[in-house]
Amino acid sequence: MQQTGSMTLHENLLGGPPPTHLPDYPEPRDLLADGTAPAEVAAKYPTSSLAWAQLADDAFERGSVVESYAYARTGYHRGLDSLRRAGWKGHGPVPWEHEPNRGFLRALHALARAAGSIGEKEEYERCTQFLQDSSPTAAQTLG
């Protein structure tokens, strides 16, 4: 990306930071796709937001909303750590189209859903807006 002063060309043209693309670590994604239990994947790869998001989804589907909330919060915070390591400054696009970003975005969605289910209105609204601001495609896809 071309630098112009202290801002990239992308920032100058669009008025914001460039999209953040998390590094690709396919092992957790591959294990989940092959049917490995999400708890086993999370234990082996505890930094994988995708594994925590899957645990949150599974718990929510069972009606274990508080458990879903806890898993989603873990995945969300693991994702924030990864985003910061990737240069994210607290705002800006996190595109759904970049597959390694999907674990974080799914965890964020799961956190909003669980927060709404337990009556945490402010957190539900904050997470819903954060998802929309990060990736309108993710917000629409995860709905």
Image: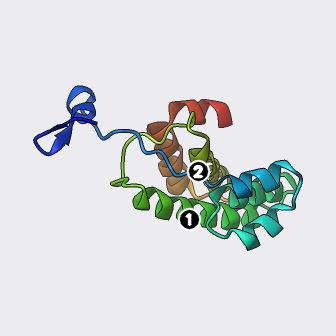
User: Could you tell which of marks 2 and 1 lies nearer the N-terminus?
Assistant: 2
Image mark for residue 87? none
Q: Amino acid at mark 1?
A: Arg
Q: Amino acid at mark 2?
A: Asp
Q: CA distance from mark 2 to mark 1?
A: 15 Å
In this view, 19 is above or below 23: above
Q: Is residue 117 visible?
A: no
Residue placed under numbered mark 1 in the picture? 78
Foreground of the two, 87 or 120: 87
Could you tell me which quadrant the N terminus lies in?
top left
In this view, 48 is above or below 14: below
Q: Position of residue 14 (x, y in %)?
A: 27, 28
Foreground of the two, 31 or 94: 31
Q: Is residue 12 visible?
A: yes
Judging from the image, the colouring scheme is rainbow
State the residue lying farthest toward the bottom.
43
Give the left or right position of residue 117, taking residue 112 as reference.
right
Q: Please report the residue visible at 58 percent of the width from the left and 52 percent of the height from the top.
A: 104
Could you tell me which quadrant the C terminus lies in?
top right
Residue placed under numbered mark 2 in the picture? 24
